């Protein structure tokens, strides 16, 4: 399957010992000759958005997007008509990245948008040109179509569901603990 914005990357059992990507599902937001960028969609952080921005009353989950630029916040959303400056990465699924954060704050304060429309990440996952393709060849990632609602993901089940969806023979991994070496 071809790597393009909007595709999901599902970590394979080859990454079981990787403390960042073990049992991860990522949405790919960019893939071109300059490299690749995506966000882990199933690793919630302890923090909420209103822990970082006290003037935002909504209790919206923050997510670990990946190991790159973890001090920076990124966001994907499905409301480009409300957020100027957003860039499409999957028009079929109505998925956009970025946009004017001042407007986002106002929309959140006025409760025009909520977690059904936007997902916030600290950090992102990034790959140099050719690096992600090499990792796919080395069987670190399965590539699959995005058939899920990114704004309504059960972080405890999404990897288990996706690992079996890409290959039913992977059912053995469905009940694997986060760190099988601790068994």
Image: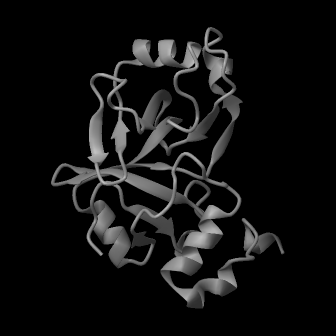
Residue 13: tell me if it is visible. Answer: no
Q: Residue furthest left?
A: 33
Residue 183, image quadrant: bottom right
* Tally of numbered tags: 0
Residue 139, image quadrant: bottom left
Q: Position of residue 34 (x, y in %)?
A: 18, 49
The residue lying at 57 percent from left, 29 percent from top is 114
Q: Nearer the viewer, residue 95 or 66?
A: 95
Q: Position of residue 155 (x, y in %)?
A: 66, 54
The residue lying at 55 percent from left, 45 percent from top is 151
Q: Residue furthest top?
A: 55
The residue lying at 65 percent from left, 11 percent from top is 54
Q: Position of residue 3 (x, y in %)?
A: 28, 65
Q: Nearer the viewer, residue 8 or 14?
A: 8
Residue 76: tell me if it is visible. Answer: yes
Q: Nearer the viewer, residue 86 or 74?
A: 86
Q: Quadrant of the N terminus?
A: bottom left
The residue lying at 58 percent from left, 91 percent from top is 169
- In the picture, measured across the screen, residue 124 lies left or right of residue 165, that is left
- In the picture, measured across the screen, residue 173 lies left or right of residue 167, that is right
Q: Residue furthest bottom?
A: 169
Q: How is the image coloured?
A: one colour
Can you say whether 45 is above or below 42 in the image? above
- In the picture, measured across the screen, residue 161 lies left or right of residue 77, that is right
Q: Position of residue 67 (x, y in %)?
A: 49, 44
């Amino acid at each position: 399957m071809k790597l393009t914005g909007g595709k999901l990357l599902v970590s394979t059992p080859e990454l079981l010992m990787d403390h960042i990507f073990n049992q991860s599902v990522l949405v790919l937001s960019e893939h071109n000759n300059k490299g690749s960028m995506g966000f882990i969609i199933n690793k919630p952080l302890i923090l909420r958005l209103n822990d970082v921005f006290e003037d935002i009353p909504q209790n919206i989950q923050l997510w670990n997007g990946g190991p790159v630029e973890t001090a920076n916040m990124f966001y994907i959303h499905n409301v480009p008509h409300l957020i100027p400056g957003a860039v499409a990465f999957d028009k079929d699924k109505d998925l956009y990245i970025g946009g004017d954060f001042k407007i986002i704050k106002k929309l959140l304060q006025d409760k025009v948008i909520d977690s059904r429309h936007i997902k916030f990440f600290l950090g992102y996952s990034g790959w140099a040109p050719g690096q992600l393709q090499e990792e796919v060849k080395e069987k670190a990632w399965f590539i699959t179509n995005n058939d899920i609602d990114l704004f309504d993901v059960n972080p405890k089940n999404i990897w288990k569901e996706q690992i079996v969806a890409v290959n039913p023979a992977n059912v053995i991994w469905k009940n694997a603990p986060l760190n099988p070496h601790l068994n």
